[in-house]
Image (spheres, rainbow, N blue to C red):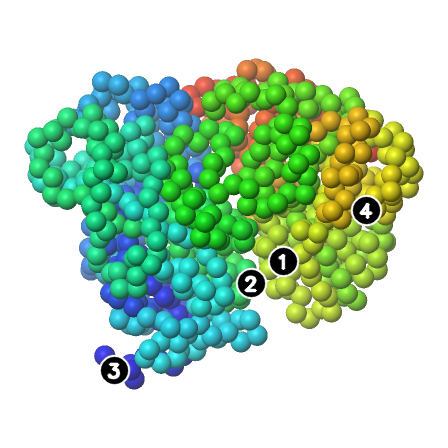
Amino acid sequence: MSPADLPSQASVIVVGGGVMGCSTLYHLAKFGVTDAVLLERNQVTSGTTWHSAAQVRALRSSRNLTELIRYSIALYSELEAETGQATGWINKGSLSIATTQDRLVHIERQAALAHLFGVEADVIGRGDARERWPLMNGDDVLGAVWSPGDGRVSPSDLCAALVKGAKARGARIFENTGITGILTRDRRIAAVETARGVIQCDALVLCTGLWSREAGLMAHVDLPVWPCEHFYLLTKPVPGAEGNLPTLSDHDGHLYIRDDSGGLLVGCFEPMGKPIDPDRIGPDFAFQLLPEDWDHFEPMMTNALHRLPVLEQAEVKMLLNGPESFTPDGSFVLGEAPLVPGLYLGCGMNSVGVATGGGAGMALARTIVDGQAPFDLGEAHPARFPPEVFTTEALTARAPEVLGKHYEITYPGRHWSTARDLRAHPLADQFRRSGAVFGQVYGWERPVVFGDAPHAPLAFGRPPWFDQVAAEVEAAHNRAALFDLSTFGTLDVEGPDACRLLDRVCANRMDRGPGRAIYTQMLNARGGIESDLTAVRISDTHYRLSVGTSAVLRDIAWLNRHAADFDVTIRDRTAEVSTIGLMGPDSAAILERLGATDLVALRYFQSVDDLVDGVAVRGTRLSFVGELGWELSCAVPAAGQLWDMLRGQGAEPAGLYAQTSMRIEKRFLSHGHDMDTDTTPLDVGLGFAVGWDTDFIGREALVRRQENGAANRLMSVLFDDSAACPIGDEPVLLDGKIIGKTTSAAFGHRVGRPVALVMFADGQVPSAGTVVETQIAAQRFSGTVNDGAVFDPSGARMKDH
């Protein structure tokens, strides 16, 4: 192929010929981008795709991630009819076994989640599990989940089919053509350089797998992707494995097992993986493998011999060791780079690239063509990581743990143990002196509970910190408590057009006088909620926004995207400002004793500058826990002094778990749990925060939804049984039919019972007072529907003083 074959221009260039790149190219062509080009520096499927075990299991942790794989399953089973190229799709189902009681609860929760998402899954007993996998030692099996819709595929055949389908629609593929540079114009993608010439483009997609960090840095974008070794054993033919069997998952043994060419494939996600120096892989690693490591695999081999006694006589073909790339949170990276418009990312697949690739490629292509994802994919958004996690030290520490947690039970309250203390919190010393137990949020160490909370093993039942959380809630309810808000993002929008810009991007009316706080959302064109925030108007030309802890980069990108025609400056002040929440009936008296009379005089949703015993603060009368309260912001160097003064006046520290319990009792919402880009303010009861007289983004979609009779679908459920332990993502049923799902849940210490926020499906919204059932693992618990808060629904406690 001569250099002349390389086009000088393409609407979209895809880099990387693995399953993600091939799927993205196929879908771009299918959606009308017929001049799309794929560049692969070696050959299609090289890198990680070719050696994938290629399991395709539908159920994931959220509805939309599950939808991606359901789309993959449909695509993989239909591609041969479209293209004439087989994909090797084999639909024999999957079997997940449990050998401990907690694992049984875990898979029962998964089965309930599957039913919620419309995925077929059944809890079965030991005998039925043995029938489906006769080679398995089932003596210690307590139960299993059978998922008949799952299967597997041939990675190389799949890519061949995707390539054939893309080419048939005009897309072009160039192998042995690596990129050597990425060119931008006005910070936007403009072209790519190759050894064979430059190609101008409107958009560039990096599906570069193991080499994603190297490729991203060409555009000055760092990507938190790091490789680990990944092992599976292949045997020669063994009796009983001649046909196709379901995929067997023994997650307690860290194993996945299936037949392979009459033999067995036994793979593992061991408790702690082995990171690889990317330089060891090198640019020419195409269809190679890493050396066998039997010492590392030995504990997994012991587990495999227990589960499959036939292995004792089986002849080993090889121990395959192929690199896979992992991200710091175990979810992949999909979407537009936040600070480089036109650069799209599809990488860090965490060993689910083949399973997810069909749907993820579709979603990435839709994002490019439509300007937004087809549905909420916040879990995979490239902006979700703090910059501190991009270091070599953090990634090499975290990636092996991510691999190990792949099969770990997802207990509530589980946190990462590696790559901690990444960001310096201004109140770290104060927290430690108060006995804080920390959880990591966006690189911050945030107190989840204080005091003598026992460090008992995690469980699905009542957590070990239950009593301590109750004490913290009691302090906030009856006296005064301090909550850390410093990790929330602080953004300043300043300039002559600050109000005009915010009236465009925010759903509420932002033209309020200085000293007013405004609760609002930023919406997309579909009316979906991109961000949930509070703004304070400091002056005619200056607003300060408080945004979600992990939403900072995403919200800055959203504001910048729409600020081109406005005379404004957008600055991230998070590292400069510390915020403390002072909440409880004694709060006013504490501020009075510290001389902050202007703060005490504030009415609800007002804000003012004042001195708290000499410390300059911006105080705002707000409450996110339903008690009388103020948010007090000061310069970071003064944060410790302010905290100590408030503690000296009797305010007691309270953590994230107490805050969560109280906000759920008050039906206060959390973005990413109770609302996201798939939900509108009308769906979640936030119509009061819509300024219908302003021309905000998403207004037309919201008006249509209102005209069509959009119901308030998010409601509260107060449980009857105080022993129930909902944690979110559980099905809610009426007369045995699923009508909704819990989005957030906790024990409500002020009401003395568990509480859940529930999103009810369109046309299935029950009336207040209806008794519904929530399925938690294999049990159902009754509760009563409320259309408002279950605690102080009038809001008198936080508004009056």
Looking at marks 2 and 1 on the same chain, the residue that comes earlier in the sequence is marked by: 2
Question: Which residue is at 52% across, 30% downward?
Answer: 413
Looking at marks 3 and 4 on the same chain, the residue that comes earlier in the sequence is marked by: 3
Do the CB atoms of the residues marked 2 and 3 lie less than 8 Å apart? no
- Give the class, few, some or many, for how many residues have Cα within 10 Å of label 3's Cα (few <14, many ≥20): few
> Relative to residue 557, is residue 792 drawn left or right?
right
Q: CA distance from mark 4 to mark 1?
A: 22 Å
Q: CA distance from mark 3 to mark 1?
A: 44 Å
Residue 330 appears in view: no
> Relative to residue 337, is residue 556 drawn left or right?
right
As shown in the figure, which amino acid type bears the numbered disc 4?
A: Arg
Asked if residue 395 is positioned above or below residue 600 in the image, the reply reads: below
Q: Quadrant of residue 308?
A: top left
As shown in the figure, which amino acid type bears the numbered disc 2?
A: Leu
Image x and y of residue 267, in percent: 24, 39
Do the CB atoms of the residues marked 3 and 1 lie less than 8 Å apart? no
Q: Which residue is mark 2?
A: 339
Looking at marks 4 and 2 on the same chain, the residue that comes earlier in the sequence is marked by: 2
As shown in the figure, which amino acid type bears the numbered disc 1?
A: Ile
